[in-house]
Amino acid sequence: MKVKASRKATFNAAHRLFRPDWDEEKNNAVFGKCNNPRFHGHNYDLIVSVTGEIDPETGFVIDLKVLKDLIKEQVLDPFDHKNLNLDVPEFQNLNPTAENIAVVIWNKLRPHIDAERELEVVLYETPRNFVTYTG
Amino acid sequence: MKVKASRKATFNAAHRLFRPDWDEEKNNAVFGKCNNPRFHGHNYDLIVSVTGEIDPETGFVIDLKVLKDLIKEQVLDPFDHKNLNLDVPEFQNLNPTAENIAVVIWNKLRPHIDAERELEVVLYETPRNFVTYTG
Amino acid sequence: MKVKASRKATFNAAHRLFRPDWDEEKNNAVFGKCNNPRFHGHNYDLIVSVTGEIDPETGFVIDLKVLKDLIKEQVLDPFDHKNLNLDVPEFQNLNPTAENIAVVIWNKLRPHIDAERELEVVLYETPRNFVTYTG
Amino acid sequence: MKVKASRKATFNAAHRLFRPDWDEEKNNAVFGKCNNPRFHGHNYDLIVSVTGEIDPETGFVIDLKVLKDLIKEQVLDPFDHKNLNLDVPEFQNLNPTAENIAVVIWNKLRPHIDAERELEVVLYETPRNFVTYTG
Amino acid sequence: MKVKASRKATFNAAHRLFRPDWDEEKNNAVFGKCNNPRFHGHNYDLIVSVTGEIDPETGFVIDLKVLKDLIKEQVLDPFDHKNLNLDVPEFQNLNPTAENIAVVIWNKLRPHIDAERELEVVLYETPRNFVTYTG
Amino acid sequence: MKVKASRKATFNAAHRLFRPDWDEEKNNAVFGKCNNPRFHGHNYDLIVSVTGEIDPETGFVIDLKVLKDLIKEQVLDPFDHKNLNLDVPEFQNLNPTAENIAVVIWNKLRPHIDAERELEVVLYETPRNFVTYTG
């Protein structure tokens, strides 16, 4: 009886999409107004899902309070009210697109989830733009 | 041409998370404030999805009015405005976690859906906590 | 320059609508399935709004972190994961309809908001049923 | 590192569910009030998802601005503020159920997405009724 | 202790914005694609609010089940799954803009609400376009 | 027959709350993590409402397409994908709190709305924090 248990969280951050090895013209052509050198920002919505057997003792796949605390420690504390490009080490040399942010979050959470459980990360940059990564 | 057709419904219920074979201390350690012996409650959002071939006659995978009536009969009538622990037989000896409620709902609906169709149940306990069960 | 500043919060609670001085028949006629003697429950959404002049120093009408903490102390701590009828003193002799809950919350918050500021409470019992009280 | 990138859009349209080869009685029995011969309508929400490798240069699976423009050209321009039965050639002989609309949209988009990328279409007819097609 | 009690409902309808006494050119200039002669449609969200004293007996301003039934009888039955221009007498000679629909709904409900109670109608044509009428 | 007609829009921006005439300690005490000197950001939701008589010719209080274009010209073009502190002249010497942003938007829109019409601006900084300004 495998069940997927999901927890939603939110963080607010500034970012800029660009490559330092490209000139301004190419950055603007590819990233448009997301390449504002003075940054813009988003309320990111994050849904983290863990899939596994229901523990017959507790009736939980994973205690969602534990998952909530893990998301706070691994994602919200380092990302919330931050500038992703300047404040978060993982994006020093990685463009903070929604895709890359989702992969970084997945990689940060993966070691803390039992290996036999599946992990999924959904990241909404806006209510109209979002990405899903399952490893 | 397999399509997944989904119908959303809502029910409001009281519940309590605990195991009668554990003492109060252990129940509190595991279930926290969800172990209030006088109960708390939720507006549960339920999404039931049926996956199968489109009927070339009607253009439906399943008539969503039929699915709506089935959800009413099998889930809303016995669960809505009820105390899950005290009013619903399935939870007499089963902890009404979101995971267990989703499995119970899936088991109640499964016999009423054609065997060759897949069935998925998503249950939101709150907008931030939800589970998915596909059998 | 009067601005209304609003903060949204959520609590999950069980309740029952009934009058102990009415018999079962009359309680059922008036309150229907909300009169389940074993309780049902809701995810209540609460929006608290304070209207006043913008403080020229901070640019705030009220620091929403302060309002968030006040809501937690006055409403979430006593109401969340509780049985409103049994756990909350204000409803020992008051039917916990959405209207009455909103008035109780307003009365609890009012002494903590500067007298010259207006206070509004919106309480959603479900996404389809909600009430507004302004004193 | 396969990621699913999703873009949400909306269109407003009139439609009617019926089969011209059935008589009024049978159309009413199967399609109910959706068979109003003078039409009714919906705000359709559409989520288009493309799954593939992240481009290491851009950090995108697909530029969501490009996907937005493709959805506008292939779906919104021909469908928005239209009568699906009368204005859209694909439904001249095809009942515009949510299932069939989703398949038509998928077929219109598929040639414009790289063949090695997976395509998914989710179509909400209402917030309570929706379908998913993945080819 | 005046409280505003609100109930949300939904109906799906087709409509067309135009004036028969204007030529096509003027109708297109003013109403744009809303003037499609073959109609388009919406999922209309409706919020009806009644403001008055709390009944000390019941704790209700108005029984929201009664308000729900009134909305069904006066609005959903005549409007849902209908063509507003062709099926609803009130719009035979009145352009079914959101503003006019809200006024029509308010006028239909007003005689059924106690005279000393205030009535408000909010009508969402889309999640981005909505109107409010209070008489 | 006065009706309030509302239009919702969205912009994404970076900002920082602080006063240059306060030292870091006082800025942190008052503005907390909103005082990150490298900025953070939000998806701001904006609802602009115009209240006035329905034009008997068109059935509109205001053509919402015209209001949409006005919001784009006056708010979205200068604010979207911008750093409010660094890119928007109005916040060179004004702390970009939600309250101040709402007042600035109201002041920018006011000259473009007929003087006898009322104007209201609601600004969501997050789904949980929002402000309302009516002049």
Image (tube, coloured by chain):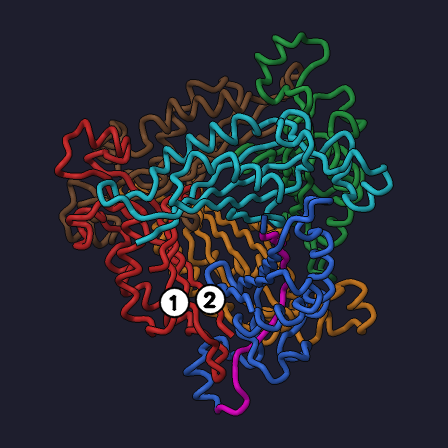
Chain colours: A orange, B brown, C red, D green, E cyan, F blue
Q: Residue at x 55, y 80 (%)?
A: F95
Q: Quadrant of residue F29?
A: bottom left
Against F52, residue D81 (above or below) is above
* Drawn side of residue C28 relative to residue F9, left or right: left
Position in image of residue D97 (x %, y %): 65, 25
Image point (38%, 60%), residue name: C120
User: Label 2: how many residues lie within 10 Å, few (<14), some (14-19) or many (20+)?
Assistant: many
Q: Position of residue C96 (x, y in %)?
A: 25, 46
Amino acid type of the residue that numbered disc 2 sits on in the rendered structure: Lys
Q: Would you place residue B27 above or below residue F27 in this image? A: above
Q: Chain of mark 1?
A: C
The residues tagged by marks 2 and 1 sit, at their Cα atoms, a distance apart of 9 Å
Based on the picture, tell me whether residue F5 belongs to the magenta stretch.
yes
Give the residue type that dot 1 points to: Glu
Using the image as rendered, state which of residue D101 and residue A64 is in the foreground.
D101
Q: Are marks 2 and 1 in contact (CB under 8 Å)?
A: yes
Looking at the image, the residue that sits furthest to the front is: E115
Q: Looking at the rendered structure, which numbered label has been put on residue C4?
A: 2
Looking at the image, is C133 positioned above or below residue B77?
A: below
As drawn, F48 above or below D122: below
Residue F107: image x %, image y %? 63, 72
- Residue E118, visible in the rendered structure: yes
Image quarter where the C terminus of chain D lies is: top right
Marks 2 and 1: which is nearer the front?
1
Please, what secondary structure does the residue beneath circle 1 have?
Answer: strand
Task: Quickly name the residue at label 1.
Answer: C118
Q: Which residues are magenta?
A: F3-22
**Magenta stretch: helix, strand or loop mostly:** strand
